Image (tube, helix red, strand yellow):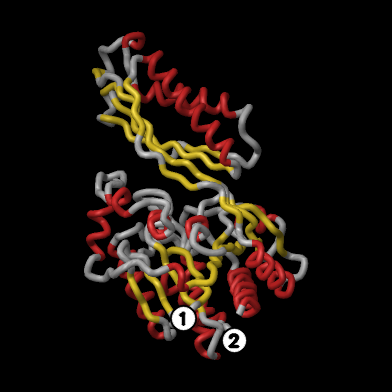
Amino acid sequence: MKINPTRFLQDLHNLRQFGAAGQGKGVVRPAYSKDDIAARQWLAGRMEDAGLVPHFDAVGSLWGLVDGPSILLGSHTDTQPEGGWLDGALGVIMGLEIARAAQEVGGPPVSVVNFQDEEGRFGVTTGSSIWGGVLSLEMADELQDRDGITFAEARASMAHLTHDFVDPKRFTGFIECHIEQGPWLDEANEAVGVVTDIVGIRDMRITFDGQQNHAGTTPMHRRQDAFQALSIFNTRLNQRMRNVVTPQTVWTIGHVSLHPNAHSVVPGRAVFSMQWRDGNSDRLARMDRIIRDTAAEVAEEMGMELSYGQMLGLEPVLMDARLQTALAEAAEAEAPGRWRKMQSGALHDAANVARHMPAAMLFVPSINGISHDFAEDTDERDLVTGLQVLARAVAALG
């Protein structure tokens, strides 16, 4: 097949106009937002122009399908609240270009997917988690975003477009190309990375309930300050994790909500996200116990009520050996000596798809390792190299 790099890059730039932040190449396109839905409808038109049959499934994931068995390529196009233009979008547009080039020469058969809510407005890779059987639609519908909107309410905004879920048996395998979202390829001046495995993740909300009170008249020794409980919890957690984790292990408190969130009021409630990632399931479980034990200890010492939200997460996932080999051989052909095998520290839709079929991933560099930020970017030459590697691998797989 003959890919068209110019057409590929133009589609990428056209997509980033939906939700353009006005700061560099930044994009604000959260799942189910007007810009997200508009981008998916535009993409459905591009799929149809490429000879694919567009299909929105029950949660708004967009599929570009061919008849008969096919390899599946893709990722997602929703973004973080302050997102980059390539996170997820690269894999979708790369899949579109390869499917289009394959259609132009009569094969191999390639289908494309754009999963909904990968970035976790409601959960963890919500759209592909439902399709992969990790999360039931009924449970997903009860999930809420930070504003209290349920997944069911959000997906109702696409009800006029959606149909049944796509049968995974129609696909022979899945490959997702993505920016690395880390510094290693960029620092080594390497063109691509072939992913060996995806780390596991756990994500939940923790709540400390204390006593809201006057900030000027409540003595420090009598306070049940929920933020102070959170602060002590965080300090102790960092100390206690040291004997359990590896240099690749990470944990993050990424969102905090205080009530009533006023200057002159001692916070009576702190709700915060707790997320941790590692490539070993046993270690993830040990971290879970440390987190819960530490939270319970702090709550008891400070007279707090303690509660937990729903635990979300995925187990570590190995990538398929045959697909890895195809990507590695293509990488050596297109970028001799300028590629590596590597673990993915970020979670991706491929982890869920792997429950249904062989799955693999390909990374391209992230400039300065920056992602989930308006400054996210990749040299366009590296984007094209990634496209060439993936196209060669797909052609070899037939």
Residue receiving disc 2 = 2
Q: Residue at x 44, y 36 (%)?
A: 274
How packed is label 1: few (under 14 Cα within 10 Å), some, or many (20 or more)? few
State which mark lies toward you, 1 or 2: 1
Q: Are the residues at dot 1 and dot 2 in contact (C-beta closer than 8 Å)?
A: no
Identity of the residue furthest to the bottom in this view: 105
Can see residue 22?
no
Residue 158 point in image, percent of width and height: 26, 65
Query: Measured along the vertical axis of the image, is residue 105 above or below residue 394?
Result: below
Quadrant position of residue 35: bottom left
In the rendered image, residue 127, in percent from the top left (x then y), is placed at 38, 58
Q: What element does badge 2 sit on?
A: loop
Q: Which mark is residue 3?
A: none
Depth check: give the residue in front, 183 or 173.
Answer: 173
Q: In the visual, does 214 lie left or right of 191?
A: left
Q: How many marks?
A: 2
Quarter holding the C terminus is: bottom right
Q: Nearer the viewer, residue 261 or 314?
A: 314
Q: Quadrant of the N terminus?
A: bottom right
Disc 2 crowd rating (10 Å Cα; few below 14, some 14-19, many 20+) is: some
Mark sitting on residue 68: 1
Under mark 1, the amino acid is Gly
- Please tell me which residue is depicted at 55% across the width and 90% down the height of the picture: 105
Residue 271 % position (x, y) = 34, 33
Left or right of 61: which side holds 94? right
- The residue closer to the viewer here, 301 or 161, is 161
The residue type indicated by label 2 comes to: Lys
